[in-house]
Image (tube, rainbow, N blue to C red):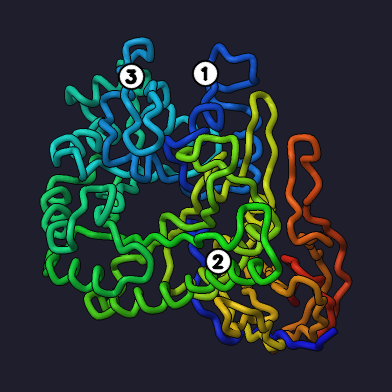
Amino acid sequence: MTTAKIVISPEEPIAIINPNIQGHFAEHLGGCIYDGIWVGEESTIPNIDGIRTDVVEALRRLRPPVVRWPGGCFADDYHWRDGIGPRAERPRRVNLWWGETIESNAFGTHEFLRFCNLIGAQPYICGNVGSGSPRELRDWVEYCNFPGESTLALERGANGSPEPFGVQYWGVGNENWGCGGSFCPEDYGAEYKRFATYLRGFGDTPLYLIACGPSGNNPDWTRRFFDKLGRFARINGFAAHYYCRTAGTATEYSTDQWYELLHRALRMEPLVVQQRAILDGYDPERKIGLIVDEWGTWHPPTPGRHPRHLWQQNTLRDALVAAMTLDIFQRHADKVVMANIAQTINVLQAMILTDGPRMLTTPTYHVYDMYQTHQGGQSLRTRFEADEIVFSLEGNAARLPGLSGSASIKDGILTLTVVNAHATSAIEADVALRQGAWSGGSVITLTDDDIHAYNTFEAPDALVPVEAPSEVHGAQFRHTFPPASVTAFRLRVA
């Protein structure tokens, strides 16, 4: 067992952690929407207006700040009028990107906004640039937000919502370098300006317009886009995407592959730092927020399931990826304003898995539950000193930090989250507070003796956090962090 040190510096605040950093993403892909969120009002599965009650209750516990919808690649072939009006009259379309399954359009604008209302989240609607028009997106905004008696607002009322929805967050396309139109940065910059010119706030709802950023940390895309944008000012957010492509499979991996995926997760930090630095060159006042509105683990197709539906099991390894990534965002709370893990249910790094009437919460869900007290907290400079983990990556030696994490304080409660990435070794650490003193609280730990552990419908609580009181007092204590663990302290500070 090695000895390490964690030093928290309340005298060095970084920024307030935007709750939207713990945002979510729900696409019309596989079982995310249908069976995951929507079962219909006639279903024998308990539901509220067709939306699964068990899913609503589980998500509400996380205090989700924002949900992005309807895609993803699906967004740039989605025409919003298909999803309004009587459901029996809505057209059935081919889902171009995700297995050519039939999209019933039973879950459309009103259903999505009802879902957001039920779980307590703000909606983030991603508009169609690839196959749509500026007029189509402009009309969607009016339909959702106009408080007067325009034809579109009256149609919204006739469809059951006389009051405006007040949707603030709007994405101007998705992955427009790929499935969103195969644009080069300059061409997308021109399209962005054309679309955004016609997107206006209505009533009391100012719009927050989000542009498509690069795939991964691609400085060239960012610079070329902003060079084309020039002095055009109707942009509030810029969204990159980053996925950890797997090492091994979702549930089968060696110890080195365990480390390899965690190593890939840490590439999020240079993305955040470098993309924000490039943005600062064009936007020194930081009026444009850096967003990562798709991120997570992406494993090979699960045998026996449709390969384009992206269903995958979610293990302890995925939980550590989630924790390490959230810690990066929280350590850089001055740089990141929103992030949306992909995806909410039954797809990629899901919070929830469903099977007919059965539902379970995943290890990643439990990380979000453990981390929710960071929302709105003041991020604090925190130093981690621990022996590095050395492992083999493509025949060469690679390194991971033994301990990593983040700390924040809000309303006198300090939240410290720590990941021990070591697959087999516990790490004992002295935890010190440079200003103030602790006066008790709690500690929550998510771990297992098996690094491949996950929950199943037969054993939905096989991997869950364990909470215990923490009687720490004073400015320093010692704690042993189990191997392959995520730990969250919630401690009162005097």
**Percent coordinates x, y for residue 333 in the rendering:** 48, 71
Neighbours of disc 3 within 10 Å: few (<14), some (14-19), many (20+) = few
> How far is the residue under mark 2 from the one under mark 3?
38 Å
Quadrant where the C terminus lies?
Answer: bottom right
- Quadrant of the rendered image containing residue 119: top right
* Mark 2 residue type: Thr
**Percent coordinates x, y for residue 444 in the rendering:** 78, 61
Neighbours of disc 1 within 10 Å: few (<14), some (14-19), many (20+) = some
* Residue sitting at x 84%, y 78%: 479
**Percent coordinates x, y for residue 402 in the rendering:** 69, 81
| Residue occupying the far front of the picture | 395
Q: Are marks 2 and 1 in contact (CB under 8 Å)?
A: no
Which mark's residue is nearer the viewer, 2 or 3?
Answer: 3
Task: Say which mark, if any, is on residue 92.
Answer: 3
Residue indicated by mark 2: 325
Q: Does 95 appear above or below 442?
A: above
Which of disc 3 and disc 2 is earlier in sequence? 3
